[in-house]
Amino acid sequence: MLNTSKYSYHYANTQEKKSPNAILVLERLKKHLQIRTNIDLANILNVKPNTISTWKKRNSMDYELIVSVCEKHGIDLNEVFYDDSTVVEVEKNNYNQNISVVTREFQYQYVNHLGEDTFMSQIPKYNFPFISGENMRAFQVTGNMMHPTLEDNSIVIARKLDEYESISDNKNYVIVSKIRGIFINRVQTLFDSPDELLLINDNKMIPQEIKIHVNEIAETWEVKAKLSYSFIEEPVI
């Protein structure tokens, strides 16, 4: 999906070692979709049939695609990604199973209702079987300012930073401004202005840089993973 050698953090577009078995996931998905063949599944997923075979061989999947199909057909993600033994293993490894996802339609309200439990209870939550850690939240990317690192509509999953935790230069963060809304950008500190951060776009066609004062920042989230809409087909052999 993405050339990860350029970045120190992980982009979760394919399966990690502790992720569910790809063959089992795909077979459960076929069962819920009431289909039998890989060709039928490939048609529903809008991929080539040999892509399904490659996923099974490599024990990897396009999770974003699988999740979107489950949502479209009203399929419980737990029933696709987990069996009883997997759920026990997930709990033992302290996996996050219910991460709030701040989609674009909720972002304005999110800023205006910061810290309100009633509002947060309305935010959709999803199970990400390959993401672990505490204080995690997902945000939808709006626009192509960070392309090709982050595409429009992709999802970043981030860990909330405590106030005492410092920002590392050139990493991606979700910065929640009390005044200007939500930014998802590469961040740099300013040597000559320690009370400000510089938000940088990766898109060379939109070389905008924004300065933001720390007093304006309500929340800071360090991006740990990305769910991408990009998909590279395997060549037909």
Image: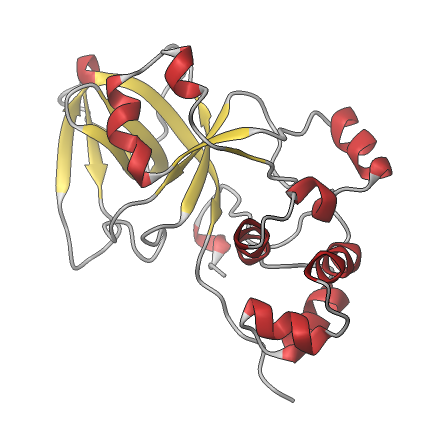
Q: How is the image coloured?
A: secondary structure
Figure label count: 0
Q: Residue at x 24, y 29 (%)?
A: 108
Q: Is residue 188 something one can see in this rendering?
A: no
Q: Please give left or right for residue 138 compared with residue 199 in the image.
A: right
Q: Please give left or right for residue 136 compared with residue 15 in the image.
A: left
Q: Position of residue 1 (x, y in %)?
A: 50, 61
Q: Is residue 159 above or below residue 128?
A: above
Relative depth, front residue between 185 and 236: 236
Q: Residue at x 71, y 48 (%)?
A: 80
Q: Position of residue 113 (x, y in %)?
A: 29, 16
Q: Please give left or right for residue 216 compared with residue 69 in the image.
A: left
Furthest toward the right, the residue is 85
Locate the C terminus and report the quarter of the image it occupies: bottom right
Q: Please give left or right for residue 115 compared with residue 75 in the image.
A: left
Query: Image quadrant of residue 175?
Result: top left
Q: Is residue 96 above or below residue 51?
A: above
Q: Is residue 63 something one can see in this rendering?
A: yes
Q: Position of residue 118 (x, y in %)?
A: 40, 13
Q: Position of residue 215 (x, y in %)?
A: 19, 12
Query: Image quadrant of residue 206?
Result: bottom left
Relative depth, front residue between 4 and 125: 125
Q: Is residue 215 above or below residue 3?
A: above
Q: Residue at x 76, y 55 (%)?
A: 28
Query: Image quadrant of residue 165?
Result: top left
Relative depth, front residue between 191 and 42: 42
